[in-house]
Image (tube, rainbow, N blue to C red):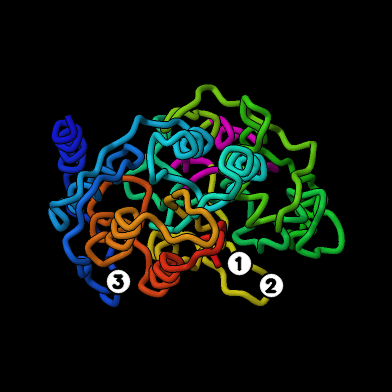
Amino acid sequence: MLKAVFLVAMAAVGAAGAPPTDAVDPDLPRYRPAPTMKGEVSIASGVLMAAWAREFMLRQPGVEVRLGKPTESSTQALQSLLDGGVQLASFGAEIQPFQREMALKAVGYAPFVVAVASGGAGGHLRAPAYTGEPPGLAIYVNAGNPLSRATLTQLDAVFSKTRRRGYPVGITTWGQLGLTGEWADKPIRRYGMALNNQHGYPHGWVYFLMQRMMDDGEFKPDIVQVPDTAYGPGQNYAFAEVVDHIVKDRYGIAHAPFSFRVPGVKTLALAENASSPFYAGTREEIAHRYYPLTMTKCLSALRKPGTPLDPVVRELVRYVLSREGQEVVAATPGDSLPLTAVFAAEQRAKLDGSADAMDPHD
């Protein structure tokens, strides 16, 4: 059964056609297998996970890697981890408070989280041109808008009611972003995916923006929210409608993945603040984590504070963070890019720690 799953997954990889163009950092260390290990480990399903498992078992033939059932959200992935369905679950970098509470209630501690790839926004069924688009979140304006760039400090004042990045006033007109003439007094109209999912909690993308763009702030209540049309991987069509609003609204601004870019809109170059460099959000800028809204793909495991990771789990993650493991990321079609050597080293350092590690950006 496992071989059949791998054949299907690797066939999907082969069907993508062109060889990968995303360079793997030559400074990433090669995988040096620990002395032959024996045992088994269960991990989340998925094409990338299956590819990692296949290559790891070639290097550690004494280990059997089993793929768990597919999950449709980070919350389901966490529940599978807490229930013992898998020992390694796919996860985003931003664990929400209610998910932390889930873990504390179930096992008494928060899960260990380690970053394994950059990117993570794209690849949806309704994305019009995913291939080649940067796997990141973008800020959209109408194509006729003269604005070409903005800082996260400004965007916090545009989208957030809390303004924790310190902008002195809320930004409500395009003139406040530097536009003149007919644009100076025109109102900014905000659009986005529904802030909460069907369970009443922020979506992963929304929570990422709350943490990264708003410094743990809150959205303004007058944002036009586009509700989900479906749930599950690759099935959230809301972003296509969000971007369509910007096509039609000359004075609109919105957030959505780059993969939903269509004629009639453009994306803004972004900077952390007024003294920081601006980045357009190219694949290279996301891979090097220069782009301010770079997302992160993570793996999560249960590790009780004061105790080490399961040896087989640790060894598998050590492989994933090696040059060979990141070459798998580069060779697997999807919304992930390899880590830089420096960032991967920061993540490997967590493998031998015993403290709670919730933030892969630390």
Q: Are marks 1 and 2 in contact (CB under 8 Å)?
A: yes
How far separated are the C-alphas under marks 3 and 2?
A: 30 Å
Residue 249 in magenta stretch: yes
Q: Are marks 3 and 1 in contact (CB under 8 Å)?
A: no
Amino acid at the residue labelled 2? Ala
Which residue, given by chain and number where applicable, does mark 3 sit on? 25
Amino acid at the residue labelled 3? Asp
Q: Which residue is outermost to the front?
A: 307
The one nearer the camera, 107 or 93, is: 107
Q: Which mark is residue 155?
A: none
Which label's residue is closer to the chain start, 3 or 1?
A: 3
For residue 326, what is the image quadrant? bottom left
Which label's residue is closer to the chain start, 3 or 2?
A: 3
Q: What crowding class fits label 1: few (fewer than 14 Cα within 10 Å), some (14-19), or many (20 or more)? A: many
Residue 73, horizontal then vertical, whole percent: 49, 34
Any part of residue 262 in sight: no
Q: Which mark is residue 271?
A: 1
Residue at horizontal 39%, vertical 68%?
A: 348
The one nearer the camera, 63 or 152, is: 63
Any part of residue 346 in sight: yes
Mark 3 element type: loop
